[in-house]
Image: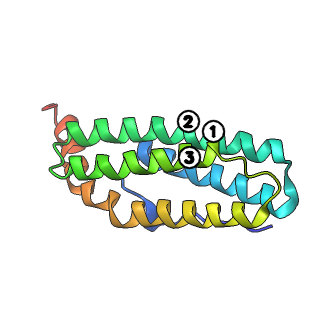
């Protein structure tokens, strides 16, 4: 079965650790999709959703730390987006979706739309700042 979200080069923020984390998040969403499409159990879906909740929080904290170091000027707006998404992901985890595949598919559509859209529209905004930070560190000025 094909992946629900296929990693593309356009998702890269050109910072290896953040790209790895984004790839991991996409992998978890793909795992949830496989469960909905009959290749996993209800327990596996709930476990993956819990993993997504936890990993989302870890990722956001890491990414925000890098943005602070890079002196990204729009960090407060970005943090608000992260906070709202973390709450929505936690809310999905608290819901008992049961065997309602239609609800799960809507949740997956939301997750896909948010993550792909966020990476492509919002995370790309900090690329020049993170690249400048990386260059500064490589040149011994960090």
| Residue 136 in view (yes/no) | yes
Q: Quadrant of the C terminus?
A: top left
Q: Tell me, what colour scheme is on the image?
A: rainbow
- In whole angstroms, how far apart are the C-alphas of marks 1 and 2? 5 Å
114, 104: nearer the viewer: 104
Q: Residues within 10 Å of mark 1 (few under 14, many from 20)?
A: some
Q: Which residue is mark 3?
A: 91
Is residue 31 or residue 129 the one in the foreground?
31
Residue at screen point 81% across, 67% down? 1
Residue 54's disc is: 2
- For the residues labelled 1 and 3, the Cα–Cα distance comes to 14 Å
Element carrying mark 3: helix
* Residue at mark 1: 51
Residue 134 in which image quadrant = top left
For disc 2, the neighbor class at 10 Å (few under 14, some 14 to 19, many from 20) is some
Residue 19 image offset from top left, x and y in percent: 45, 50
Residue name at image x 63 percent, y 42 percent:
94
- Front in this rendered view, residue 94 or 131: 94
In the picture, measured across the screen, residue 42 lies left or right of residue 51, that is: right
Residue 112 placement (x, y as % from top left)? 56, 64
Name the outermost residue toward the front: 95
Contact check, label 1 and label 2, Cβ < 8 Å? yes
Residue under the point 70% across and 65% down: 105
């Amino acid at each position: 079965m094909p992946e629900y979200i296929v990693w593309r080069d356009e998702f890269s923020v050109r910072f290896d650790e953040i790209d790895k984390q984004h790839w991991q998040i996409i992998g978890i969403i793909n795992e949830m999709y496989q469960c909905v499409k009959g290749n996993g159990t209800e327990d596996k879906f709930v476990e993956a959703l819990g993993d997504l909740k936890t990993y989302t929080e870890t990722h956001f904290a890491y990414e925000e730390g890098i943005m602070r170091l890079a002196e990204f000027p729009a960090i407060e707006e970005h943090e608000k987006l992260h906070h709202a998404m973390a709450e929505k992901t936690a809310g999905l985890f608290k819901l008992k979706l049961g065997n309602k595949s239609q609800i799960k598919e809507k949740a997956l559509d939301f997750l896909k739309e948010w993550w792909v859209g966020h990476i492509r529209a919002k995370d790309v905004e900090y690329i020049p700042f993170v690249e400048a930070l990386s260059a500064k560190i490589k040149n011994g000025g960090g």
